[in-house]
Each structure stands twice: as structure tokens, then as C-alpha cells.
Image: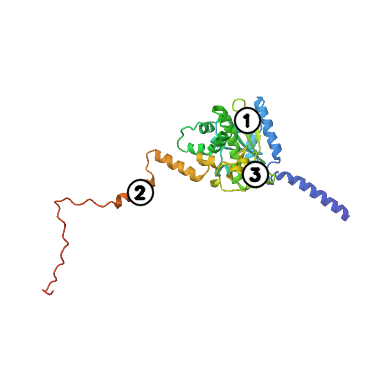
Amino acid sequence: MRHLNRIHIGIAAAVVAYLVAPLVSAGGVPGGPQISPADALQKLQVGNARYVCGKSDHPNQDAARRQEAFTGGQHPFAAVLTCSDSRVPVELIFDQGIGDVFAIRVAGNITDKHQTGSIEYAVEHLGVPLVVVMGHRACGAVAATCSKADVHGNVASIVRSIGPAVERVQKRQPDLKGDALVAEAIKENVFETIATLLSTSQPLNEMVKAGKIKVVGAVYDIEQATVSWLGVHPQESTILAAGVKSIGDHSGATDSNSGAKEQAQTGAVPGDGGAAAAGGSNPASAHGEAAKGHNQTGSESPTKVAGETATRDKKTPPPPPPSAKPKTAPQPAKPSGGHP
């Protein structure tokens, strides 16, 4: 009888484990998507193939899905960091629906604390197993950086962030010009963003090391609708091993092709020169460029103004005109009572 009870208990435990297991994602997050990084990637690839052929399924886009996502929460299976360009509609490109893709969009598909924090939320709290950094053909932000276009306002900060990637391509292939340079810089900029994510985010760095998530690059062709997959960063293992630093300290990612070789030859971290030259992610350089741009608009530098003020204060007053008589000091009044 006891033997039968143990069997029944064992069966019950197995059933409970089977029922509970789907509630935990591949990344260990309760309620997260039940899909591996490889399967998530394949799902995006298949969806894009449908879109390219004009045979999209348009899944999860009806009223029932909206209600399900509202009451049950979101459970995306992929996070996509891509450009704000209106010709890059993420859900349409991959033929996905409501709650399927956690999308982060910013001009030039660059990243800073806001974008990185959004991705951390996706992988840590939503259990997303796959992160895609996707550039696109004919990216205006990259083209402006390559041509050294005269940009104003906060757009300049976007160009500075893309600058290190463009400089590495120019250093590697100095003969590239025009569209050819832009095309290579678009890919290099994708790897720049991936390197920034892995080198400035402790959660992403650790989860990639543990094999819980995968971070891959891609480039979307806005004319053909196809997605070219670049895979993981070529220097991923080196970046992960280097550890994590703050985004403010990030001064250029490892060259996707020859960063390790450059570092061995020069003893410097690859990308430092490019970042400094372009303003990049180096806070001191960016601040210097901003100050320079501010002064060129006609506003006075605070240091300059303070210096001139101090100089003016130190000047001796001009001598009185010849006709002016020097003033005599007032004599003390005699005390009353006639006493000296």
C-alpha cells in the first residue's frame, strides 16, 4: 500500500512539474515566452520570408489578441532595437502581431542608458531570449555621418555616436566612398551598438555568457524587404571577457574585423581614437564639441567672459584731469568746551 502511495505521489509530482514548466521562460522568468534564442531567431526569419513573398499571416492582430494581451500581460519572444525610420515597420517586416516583439526605436539604432535599460527590462522581466540590433539600407543618420553633414541641435549627438563606426570602416577600407562607404558603415554601426550593450550592461553581459539570451545583428533592405543576418559580434568573447563599464566610460567598441589585432599592435583599446575624433561616446570629447559648437553660434565662452572681467577689474583707474584739484582730507572737529 505504501509502495502504491509513493508511486501516486511521484506521478502527481511529475504532472505538477509538467504543468508548471511552461510558466517559466527559457531565460528563467516566470510567465515568459517558451522559446529558445535559436527558435526565436527562426521565427523572425520565417516571418520575414512570408513578408517578402507577400504572403503575411498577420497573426495576433485581432480583438481577441488585444484582450489577451491586456488581461494576461505581454510575453514577447524577441526584442528588436532598430532605427526610427518610418520605412522600418518592425512587426510588419517579421509578420508578427500584438505582444510578439518588444521594439525599441531610435535614429541610427544607437544605444545609451535609455535604450539599454529598455532591453534589460525585456530580458530580465519579460523573459525575452533574443535581442536583435537591426540597421537598414539607406540609413540617413549613417549617411550624414559619412558625409560629415552640417547637423544642428540634438541631431549632432546621434552623429557623434555613429562616428566611431564610420571611422573604423574608413581606416580599414580607405578607398570606400559614397554608397559603398555608407553600406559598410551601416553594418559596422550595428556591431558598435552590440558592443556597447554587452560592455555597459551587467545583466546582458552575464545572460549572454550563461547562454540564456543571444544578441545578434541584422540589416533590413527597405527596397527588397529582406533582412540580412549578421550573427553575433565577431569579437563577442573578447567583449564579454573585458567586463562591464558605465556607458559614460564607453569610448568606442572593439573593431568588428580587426580590433584585437589593432589592440595588440598599439596597446590601446580599439576605437578610442575614432571616438575621440568624432566626439563619440567619450563624455569629455562630446562636451568639448558641444562647447565648440555653442561658441560658434556667437555666444561667449564662460571662461572667456570671466577672464575678460578679471582683466578689466585689475586695470588702474585713469589719472584725474590736470585742472582737477586733489581733495584734502577732512580735519577733525574741535571738542566743545575749549579744552584741547
Is 44 placed above or below 303 here? above
Q: Quadrant of the C terminus?
A: bottom left
Q: Nearer the viewer, residue 11 or 331?
A: 331
* Mark 2 residue crowding within 10 angstroms, few (<14) / some (14–19) / many (20+): few
Q: Mark 3 vs mark 1: which is more N-terminal?
A: 1
Specify the farthest residue to the front: 265
Q: Nearer the viewer, residue 148 or 142?
A: 148
Q: What label sits on residue 307 in the rendered view?
A: 2
Residues marked 3 and 1 touching at CB (< 8 Å)? no
Q: Nearer the viewer, residue 116 or 257?
A: 257
Between the C-alphas of marks 1 and 2, the distance is 58 Å
Q: Residue 309 placed where, x, y %?
A: 32, 49
Image quarter of residue 238: top right
Dot 2 falls on a residue whose secondary structure is helix
Q: Residue 87 placed where, x, y %?
A: 56, 29
Query: Is 73 displayed left or right of 18 in the figure?
Result: left
Residue type of the residue flagged with mark 3: Thr
> Residue at image x 59%, y 25%?
223
Between the C-alphas of marks 3 and 2, the distance is 48 Å
Residue type of the residue flagged with mark 1: Ile
Dot 3 falls on a residue whose secondary structure is helix
How many callouts does the rendering have? 3
Between the C-alphas of marks 3 and 1, the distance is 32 Å
State whether residue 39 appears in this view: yes
Dot 1 falls on a residue whose secondary structure is helix
Which residue is identified by label 3?
Answer: 238
Q: Residue 173 placed where, x, y %?
A: 58, 32
Q: Quadrant of the N terminus?
A: bottom right
Which residue is identified by label 1?
Answer: 93
Depth check, mark 3 against mark 1: the one in front is: 3
